[in-house]
Every structure is written in structure tokens, then in C-alpha cells.
Image (spheres, rainbow, N blue to C red):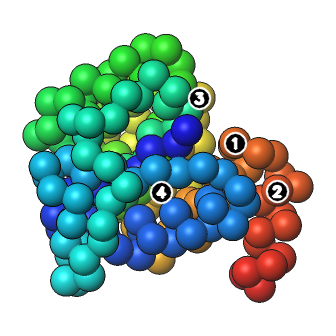
Amino acid sequence: MNYLFLDNGFEEIEAITTIDLLRRANIAVTTVSITGNPMVLGAHNIAVEADGLIERIDFSDAEMLILPGGQTKLGECSALCDLLVAHNEADKPISAICAAPAVLGKLGILKGKQATCYPGFQDALGESYVGGLVVESKNIITAKGPGLSSDFAFCIIEHIKGSDAADAVYDAAQY
């Protein structure tokens, strides 16, 4: 299972586009609220009901962990941070877009890897920051910001199911 984490203030386009395109590729993705409430309010006042709460999910089947950006407190959720560190130590894939790669940088997950992020968050990435639009490095996929949500999702699809699956969704979506 692939898990996408939501906190109040998440960037809706980054979360919803990623969920939509992954599901079009028949990739299972479960949305997870870290707020203690299944209803999560995005940065532009779009409410989304998460599939589950972080404290109630067994992540033993986790394949990829996905972090949308926005003005969130993802990096302050100890359960999520512990999960990210353990996932990385197991060399399992993690993807983050916009401001969310800063969470990975602060946790030391980006050491020895390349990454990108939204302008202004580069310091948290340290030596890993290389700019770019979408960067895949080892087990990490990062993207610069909201306008790259589709490219981010297509990179995830290609990582999970290969280029033929990504191309099929790409063509069907008329991208």
C-alpha cells in the first residue's frame, strides 16, 4: 500500500493530483490524516476526508510514503517522522513535493541523495539541494512545487509500475 499524509494547510493540487493520477494507474493509495480528525482542510479551504488516521493504521504493508507540501506541520508529527526514518532505513521509497522535502532534510533522510524543493526551503536540504523540477535519487522522489504535481505523480507511477503504465495514464489524461 502507498500512503499519502495530510495535515491542515496541505497544498490541494499536490495531494489531489497525485492521488488521482496514481489511482488512474491502478496504484492503491490511502490518505492519512495526522490531525486526529479525518476531515483535513487544505491551504485553499478545500476540505478532504482522509481514508484513515495515522494513529489507527498499521503501516507494515507500506510501499511508498508520499508527502504533499503546504503550510503544514508534517515534520512535527513524531509518528510520521519515526515512520519516515524507518522507511528510509529500509531503503523503501519516499516522495515529497514543494515544502515537504524540508521534512526529509531535517530528518537526515536526504544525506547522500539529491533533491529539490519549493524556493526558500533549500537550507533544510543542505548539500542534497540540486534544484531541478522533479528529482529522483536512490529511494527519494522530490518535486519543486504545485505546478509540477502531474510530473511528480507520473514519476511516482513510473517508479512503482514502470514507464508503460506512466505513459498510458499520461496519454489518457491528454497531458
Give the labeled residue for mark 3: 138
- Mark 1 or mark 4, whichever is nearer to me: 1
- Spatial CA span between label 3 and label 2: 21 Å
Dot 1 amino acid type: Ile
Disc with the residue nearer the chain's start (1 vs 2): 1
Quarter that holds the C terminus? bottom right
Dot 4 amino acid type: Ala
Residue 164 image-quadrant placement: bottom right
Disc with the residue nearer the chain's start (3 vs 4): 3
**Residue 26 placement (x, y as % from top left):** 71, 56
> Are the two marked residues, 1 and 2, in contact with CB atoms closer than 8 angstroms?
yes
Label 4: state its secondary structure. strand
Residue 119 image-quadrant placement: bottom left
Q: Is residue 22 left or right of residue 173?
A: left
Q: Nearer the viewer, residue 37 or 72?
A: 37
Dot 3 amino acid type: Lys
Give the labeled residue for mark 4: 143
